[in-house]
Amino acid sequence: MPYKVAAFYQFTPLPDFESLREPLRNMCVALDIKGIILLAAEGINGTVAGNSVAIDALMKQIQQGALFGGRTNNLELKFSTATDMPFNRMKVRLKKEIVTLKDDGTDPTRQVGTYIDARDWNALIARPGMVLLDTRNDFEVEMGTFAGAVDPHIKSFSEFKEFADRTLDPTRDTEIAMFCTGGIRCEKASSYLLSRGFRNVFHLKGGILKYLETIPEDESRWKGDCFVFDQRVALGHGLAERAQSQEDDDE
């Protein structure tokens, strides 16, 4: 029986995030769920796997249960499947950021770019003058990306600031469309660009995973596979598994 995989995040104030760690981990363990969840004052970010009933129960508790008190009721949430359990154990980690940019002035709860639905993405990136920007790390881009996208050649997302400051110009790059695996990095990246004077910043809602889930392969602008941070390694159109051998990644 295949496992159900949930990838989710939400930027939302969680000043008590440290106290949430153990109750959340205990909840996951009781449901026989494995994966990794990051908690920070700015929100929650995770990917977990288990049987379908358990995953649905956990998502309901995170979104509606007493532990988070309704603060995580607007998760960006995507489901896929795995033939084998894609994680070795359950981890809940406390972080300074749920996705690391290292810029105190960037706040996705205050401002982010314009969300673009997967069904509208092809038309957007075909617009003349649109800068199509991949915000992921170099090894991810090498595995697959959208045709015509700019590769920032970064080894970690925290390097995106330097790339943007060095390469992008708000007077020249008047429209920017960015994408990442599930959407979380784009929320931070778009918030950073807006704080630096860029005006028309768009990002793919739900990220590449939502696009691959939604858009038929014969209509797709995506080339290659999408790297995921679990033992499935990569997913293709329809979120089909492309590989099944990788050590559990802690990132």
Image: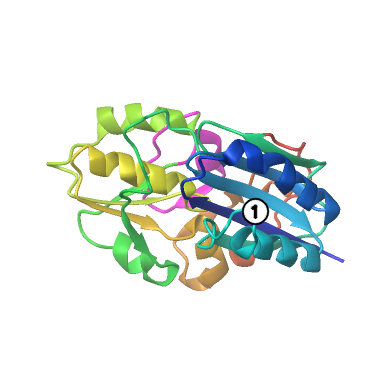
Q: Position of residue 197 (x, y in %)?
A: 18, 41
In the rendered image, residue 39, in percent from the top left (x then y), is placed at 59, 41
Quarter assignment of residue 169: top left
Answer whether residue 143 is visible to the viewer in this image: yes
The percent position of residue 68, horizontal first and vertical second, equals: 59, 54
In terms of depth relative to the viewer, which is nearer, 241 or 80?
Answer: 80
Q: Is residue 144 magenta?
A: yes
Q: Amino acid at mark 1?
A: Leu
Residue at (49, 60) in percent of width and height:
206
Is any part of residue 230 visible from this angle? no
Q: Residue at x 65, y 62 (%)?
A: 65
Residue nearest the observer in this picture, 57 or 13: 13
Instruction: Determine which quarter of the picture holds residue 173.
Output: top left
Q: Quadrant of the C terminus?
A: top right
Q: How many marks?
A: 1
Q: The N terminus lies in which quarter of the figure?
A: bottom right
Relative to 32, say whether 239 is above or below. below
Say whether residue 113 is magenta.
Answer: no
Q: Which residues are magenta?
A: 136-155
In the image, residue 31 above or below residue 186: below
Q: Which residue is mark 1?
A: 67
Q: Residue at x 54, y 57 (%)?
A: 72
In-image side of 48 versus 63 (left or right): right
Q: Position of residue 94 (x, y in %)?
A: 62, 34
Residue extending farthest left? 171
